[in-house]
Amino acid sequence: MSCEHCARAQSDAIWPGYQARCRGCEVRALANGPAFFESAQAQRISTTYRTALEKLLGPDWQTSHREVRAEYERLQAMKSIRDTKP
């Protein structure tokens, strides 16, 4: 499935749009969400974050976590480039 919001988010790190039932959008939403942030700060996967992974992305939470972490890193890199431009 082609998602306009995922396409826009490839070039805009702060793109606010999401489409229901789109895995890419769900991954991006988790990467931008408080459950991931809290787990990253604690340097461990919290029960809340793991539950969100399983509920939104399926039972293979470890693979899903790798997707979310990669998306977070991609977005952070884009934001960093944007913030350094004059």
Image (cartoon, grey):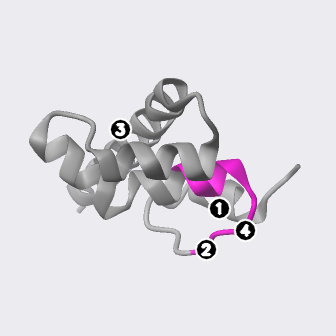
For this orientation, the residue located farthest to the left is 42
In space, the residues marked 1 and 2 are separated at their CA atoms by 9 Å
Q: Which residue is mark 1?
A: 8
Magenta segment includes 49? no
Q: Residue at x 33, y 42 (%)?
A: 77
CA neighbours of label 3 inside 10 A, class few (<14), some (14 to 19), many (20+): few
On the image, the x and y values in percent for residue 75 come to 40, 48
The residue that label 2 is drawn on is 17
Query: Picture quarter containing residue 14?
Result: bottom left
Please tell me which of labels 4 and 1 falls first in the chain.
1
Tell me which amino acid carries mark 4.
Ala
Give the amino acid at mark 3: Glu
Query: Of marks 3 and 2, which one's residue comes earlier in the chain?
Result: 2
Q: Cβ–Cβ below 8 Å for labels 3 and 2?
A: no
Q: Residue 26, can we see it?
A: yes
- For the residues labelled 1 and 3, say whether their Cβ atoms are less than 8 Å apart: no
| Element assignment for label 3 | helix
Check if mark 1's residue and mark 2's residue have beta carbons within 8 Å.
Answer: yes
Marks 3 and 2 sit apart, C-alpha to C-alpha, by 19 Å
The amino acid type, in three-letter code, at marker 1 is Arg
Reply above or below: 45 against 39: above
Coordinates of residue 68 in the picture (x, y in percent):
46, 40
The magenta region covers: 17-27
Q: Is residue 10 visible?
A: no
Dot 1 crowding, Cα within 10 Å, few <14, some 14–19, many 20+: some
Foreground: disc 3 or disc 4: 4
Location of mark 3 (residue):
73
Is disc 4 in contact with disc 1, using a CB cutoff of under 8 Å? no
For badge 2, the amino acid type reads Gly
Mark 2 to mark 4: distance in Å? Answer: 10 Å
Q: Identify the mark at residue 20; answer none if there is no mark.
A: 4
